[in-house]
Amino acid sequence: MKIEDVMTLVRPCIAQMEPYSTARDEYKGSLGILMDANENPFPHEGMNRYPSTAQRQQLLRAIAKLKGVGEEQVFLGNGSDEAIDLCFRVFCVPGKDNVVSIAPTYGMYSVCAAMNDVEYRPVQLNADYTLPVDLLLAAADDNTKLLFVCSPNNPTSNAFPRQDIAGLAERFRGIVVVDEAYIDFADTPSMKTEIERLPNVVVLQTLSKAYGMAGLRVGIAIAAKPIVDIYNKVRYPYNIGTDTLALALKMLSETKEPEQKGMILAERRRLGEALKSIPEVEKVYPSDANFLLVKVRHAQELYDYLIGRGVIVRNRNNVQGCEGCLRITIGMPVENFHVLEEIKKFSAGE
Ligand SMILES: *Cc1c(COP(=O)(O)O)cnc(C)c1O
């Protein structure tokens, strides 16, 4: 699709609306005595003022540089969950439009669909967790605005080949949302380099996983400039707080590569191999993320046993396509050792 055609997908009310104009948007000169935004003038830990546009711009610049994309191609959200919600609010007319998604996958897509009164059409991955490209396209109709592909996928832990995702974007006449929350742990390259050729692709990334800032709430959308502009028009004016902006900027300036990525990848390999030798474990799926999807013989019982031992994993036993599976996040070496020992004990019937 051409970007002009992509922009015709925007809901008419969103395309036409005037964005909220903040006090700081209207006055752009040098800062003097601030009496324009009804703030409390007393310092309050430096938090009495609304977040500054300049500081937001600074973080935007740092993230654009880090990702090797243009500043105008980056949107910053309150976690990528905000960016997911914005995809719905920007492109989907409630009660009329629908979205297609892979299944099983991240739960927020269906939650946001329900919240926005948009029909959600899940399409099961193939049994080997590969992408059912033709089935996904067949599930779409004239009112399908979004197609969600989480890659690497949560909870199946695999990344999809770039050519599969690109093939979807070439054939689908809507927005392909590629959620790359775990891309830093994968060998597969990001789709961010394709957005000029395929402007109907919106790539979602986050500082929550590899960059270790889940508590800060900074999510990233990388997309063509007109899409980024629309997302900025629709987001809440101050969606990222002053303390978050400052801390994210500071932490990013201290590291270029996600700091513990090497250790997490080494632990992923080590834990995966060790799990495979336990009789209780049927299968450890190959992972491109910072977690392992592990198929076991007694998923519910093992899950309860681990809880009893103070180890909390994610039970995916009741998720269609993940029957018998637990999802285990890679922890610190001592924690991985511990979960392994507990699973061994369970397996040995202790
Ligand atoms: C964890 C996760 C996110 C996280 O989003 P944030 O709101 O940025 O913390 C997004 N997508 C997927 C698939 C995830 O697993």
Image (cartoon, helix red, strand yellow):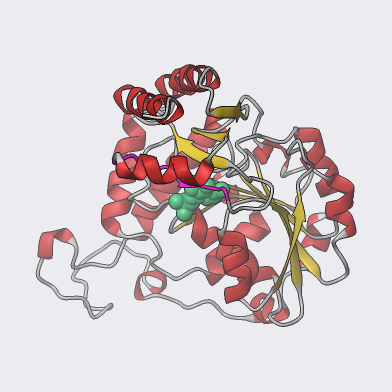
Q: Which residue is found at the position 37% from the left and 40% from the top?
A: 306
Left or right of 195: which side holds 239? left
- Magenta residue span: 310-317
Residue 15 position, x and y percent, is 68, 75
Most frequent secondary structure within the magenta stretch: loop
Q: Which residue is found at the position 42% from the left and 51% from the top?
A: 218
- Front-most of 255 and 62? 255
The quadrant the C terminus occupies is: top left
Q: Which residue is found at the position 53% from the left and 17% from the top?
A: 277
Residue 232 position, x and y percent, is 53, 64
Residue 39 position, x and y percent, is 21, 76
Quick check: 344 above or below 179? Answer: above
The quadrant the N terminus occupies is: bottom right
Q: Which residue is found at the position 37% from the left and 47% from the top?
A: 214
Q: Is residue 172 in view?
A: yes
Residue 56 position, x and y percent, is 39, 54
Q: Is residue 313 magenta?
A: yes
- Front-most of 159 and 308? 308
Quadrant of the rendered structure where residue 92 is? bottom right
Quadrant of the rendered structure where residue 98 is? bottom right
Q: Residue furthest front?
A: 349
Q: Is residue 207 in view?
A: no
Callout count: 0
Q: Is residue 304 magenta?
A: no
Quick check: 135 above or below 126? Answer: below
